[in-house]
Image (tube, grey):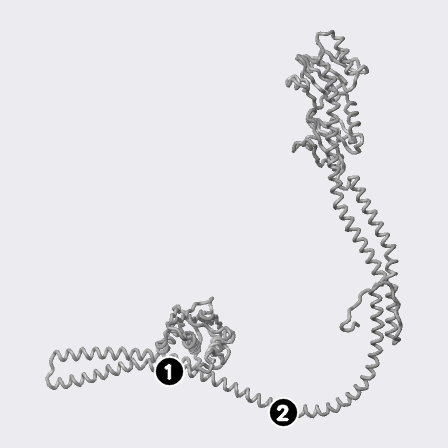
Amino acid sequence: MNLPGRLTVTSEWRLRTSLTLLLVVATLVTFGIIGFGVLAYRVPAILEEDRQHLRNDAVSLARYFEQLIDGLEGRLGTLAALDMTMQPAHIQRFLDAVIAEGGFKAIYVLNGRGHVEHVGLPQNAPNVRPNLVGADLSRNPLFATAHHLGRRVWSDRYLSALNGDATVGLAIPFGDYVLLGEVAPDFAVEVLRAGAEDLKFPVLVVDRAGEYVVGKNLAEGERLRNWSAELRGTPLEADGDIRLLRFAGTLYDTGLARSDKLQWTFLVTMPTGLENPRVRITIGLVLVGFVGSMLLALVLAPMWAARMSAPLRDLIAQTRALTSGRFGGKVSRGKILEFNQLASDMESMAAAIRQRQGELERSEERLLQSLQNVQQLNLLLEQRVELRTIDLARANRELSEAMETLKLAQGELVRSEKLASLGNLVGGVAHELNTPIGNGVMAVSTLQDQVRAFRREMESGLRRSTLEAFVDRVERGSEIAVRNLQRANELIASFKQVAVDQTSVQRRQFMLAEVVDEILLTLQPTLKRTPCRIDCRIPEGLAMDSYPGPLGQVLTNLLTNSLNHAFEGRAQGLIEIFAERQGDDQVRLLVADDGNGIPPELLDRIFDPFVTSKLGRGGSGLGLHIVWNTVTVVLGGSISVDSMPGLGTRFRITLPLVAPRQTSAA
């Protein structure tokens, strides 16, 4: 079971083991970072150095071949000075002498038609000279090129006329003749062996068609391979180039150089990546160093950890002595500053514990005395608590009675507010009825006077003009009386419907536009005394099955609220009443004004009871509370308000077209 506030120890290590692991890990991580850095820096540098060496080796090999080829050209070029009118035997001796010097396996003197007139062969060659003299070599590509261009030309590989083996040759035109020398196979091999003596990886020389000329350290398949596809692409630079080629399935960095004279390409290779010998040596050295550092850390780390943990073991022993109550022991010092500071702190702690123990014993005596005093005080406190409890119960009853009284007062205020609204409505309608009824009474009184005058005139003798004037005055007076009485009748009918609706929660079906018009009609006397104009836009045919009385009281309170608060200090204002259907079963009613707006500190509490900006100046703060209560409870809808100071107020009322049923009248 773990005690609260303690950490759960899942595993414990000895300090010596932890220090050993720490030193070993630190050593390995350090060497690993250093080794990785060395490899990350050195391996690319080695590969780049080898590529530069390959480039240089390829260029050097090409230059070396060109120098030796220049010697062959010079020796063959001396024969171009022969006088072809000499005896054939003399010409033959000159040709055999050049053959004897080495480098050529056959030299042909061709006339302009490509026929062999003289041929020089080695002494050990088969006796084929008679078969070669007179042979037609006009189709030999080397002869055709030299004869056409009129200059010295080295060939690609072709089949020798001597023995049918693949060879390369040099053609030198002179006069009407062409000297054609076929290079001995062992000559190119000896040149490559001398020029690439130190190269241990594949070395290759190919002609302009990509065919093998001579090579070293090559598999048999590489000799038969055509290299034109690998060498196709960007022209080689004068100082050589590097490409990644595959020999016998292995990738090599390959240095490339091309001889402008021979049009041969020289390839010198070195394994790339981890196959590179220098890269392997570098990686091996890093691994040896890593293993060596790990072994050295494993040997030295335990010794160093044991040296560091010895003073700590002494501190642990002294701590155990302190827990058993043995004070005053001296802790040995070592060479580690922190352990020495800890030893000094432990000695100070032991002295402080001894002092605290004495103080604790003295405190226990004082505590016993205090405990007795507390017990006496508890008895007195219990008596006081009983008295205070009795007083609190009495105060609680009085508070409950006050709350009930406050609720009754609040209900009375709400009913008074509703009756006051209806009283204002009655006063306004009475004032409005005064005009048409007064006009009607005046018209009837005038008619009565006209009738009396007409009667007196009848007694004295009635004239036609008098009768016509009397009929005309009676007609105009009756029209005035009827018009004013009809106006009064309309006002009384509207007031009667509104009064009946607002004094009882009577549910009925009605057109929203008609109910709103009746409310506005009853408010006309109040609106005439204000600078406010009302813009009402209620669509026709919007029928509801609801409570027109509470709905009228909501509109009356909202309009009265705007008239009392929105346009204070303003010469004119506008109130908009707008309605639209929402979905199939709801209607949204909007009552907005462009007045002064609601103060921000009142906006969140505007529907709470007794919240008003004119408290003490005729405002009760119950108008909008009645609106909210009527909309949400009676009409089954919702109401929200948006307002900004100076930009007006907008009340949004969402009502169901069919109101929920009420169990009792509100």
Task: From the viewer's perspective, tell me whether residue 442 is left or right of residue 386.
Answer: left
The one of 74 and 209 positioned closer to us in this rendering: 74
Amino acid at the residue labelled 1: Val
Q: Residue 45: image x %, image y %?
A: 74, 41
Quarter assignment of residue 131: top right
Q: Nearer the viewer, mark 1 or mark 2?
A: 2
Labelled disc at residue 391: 2
Q: Secondary structure at mark 2?
A: helix
| Image quarter of the N terminus | bottom right
Quarter assignment of residue 511: bottom left
- The Cα–Cα distance between marks 1 and 2, rounded to whole angstroms, is 52 Å
Q: Residue 372: image x %, image y %?
A: 78, 90
Q: Residue 420: image x %, image y %?
A: 42, 83
Q: Secondary structure at mark 1?
A: helix
Q: Which residue is label 1 attached to?
A: 426
The one of 176 and 656 positioned closer to us in this rendering: 176
